[in-house]
Image (cartoon, rainbow, N blue to C red):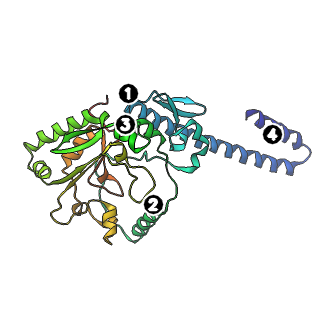
Amino acid sequence: MQAVFKKLAYTVKRKNAKAPVETSLTSAFLMLFMFFFMHLQSLHAQTLSQGEQVMKALAAAYPDRVGRAVLRNGDWAVQVYGVWFYYAGGRLLPEELRMRSAEYDPQTFYRYPRDLPEWKAPDTEATAQFRSMQQRRSSRTTKRSQHFFDALWRASNKDEAYRHVKTIRFLGWNVLVHYSILEELALIEEAINNEAKVNTQVRQWLNAITSLSAWNWRNIADVQSRSFHSYGAAIDIQVKALRGEETYWLWTSQKGVDWWAVPYQSRLHPPDVVVKIFESYGFIWGGKWLFYDTMHFEYRPEAFILNNIPMNGIR
């Protein structure tokens, strides 16, 4: 590219004595071209920087399954059980699908907040935006690529997934979960039970649980993408509502209620300490999502690494 710049500059110099007006136009074109090229380089560098962060976070989050992140073929990549996966603009695609990244939505490597953000009543403009977001979500024809997480959890179909889940007793309920998170769940249960001995709110929450479920081979409701329940890496803990509190944005919407206008005090939140215990072992909580799901906990340690939120350690 430097050779191109030199050639253009030389052309400008030769024409300078013969055609001042033409030279001026050529110089302007050259400056515009250089600005555009530098802008593209900047965007490319930002993409690579984000890709480097994400792939290194995944390698750190799952060291028993994911190899170290390397810059390979112009993109950041990791190996999962010996298979190369590329960042591919956030799509996490195997090598043979890199050129088809436009067919997929990016993965949700979103900013996970350390604390629950302040809730603000939506105004007219915000209400219109929320309605538009919901419409786009339900009408989306593309989906996220499941290839990386299928490989990570070794579950590309229902039968494979079932072979990697185990039945455990968790918070007094039998539940099917992926074998690789048994230790984390055991430590979470121990911490919650210890807290319940001295914390009335936690004890009441435990006693109010009406169901607890994890493995369920399915897509996320109202979208095409695979749910983490399919891997046994997500847990739903439903608790009896005492005052008609809302739990899940879609259920709220199906009742004809504007889910985005429901304040926190009208949502069925677990005690803060329970959320913090789950988070300390790598589980994000769906109550912090815009499309809230307050019963949902999902094992995503990479989210904490990407957002510099400490955990109790990763095996």
- Which residue type carries mark 1? Asp
- Which residue type carries mark 2? Arg
| Neighbours of disc 2 within 10 Å: few (<14), some (14-19), many (20+) | few
**Helix, strand, or loop for circle 4?**
helix
- Which residue type carries mark 4? Leu
- In the picture provided, is 207 more to the left or to the right than 17? left
- Which residue type carries mark 3? Ile
Identify the disc placed on residue 286: none
Query: Is there CB contact under 8 Å for labels 3 and 4?
Result: no
Q: Is residue 79 above or below residue 123?
A: above
Real-space Cα separation, disc 3 to disc 4, in angstroms: 46 Å
Q: Which residue is mark 2?
A: 137
- Camera-near label (3 vs 2) is 2
- Camera-near label (4 vs 2) is 2
Identify the disc placed on residue 8: 4
> Which of 145/14 is in front?
145
Q: Which residue is mark 3?
A: 305
Q: Residue 150 lies in what quarter of the image?
A: top left
- Mark 3 vs 1, N-terminal side: 1
Real-space Cα separation, disc 4 to disc 1, in angstroms: 53 Å
Real-space Cα separation, disc 3 to disc 1, in angstroms: 16 Å
**Helix, strand, or loop for circle 3?**
helix
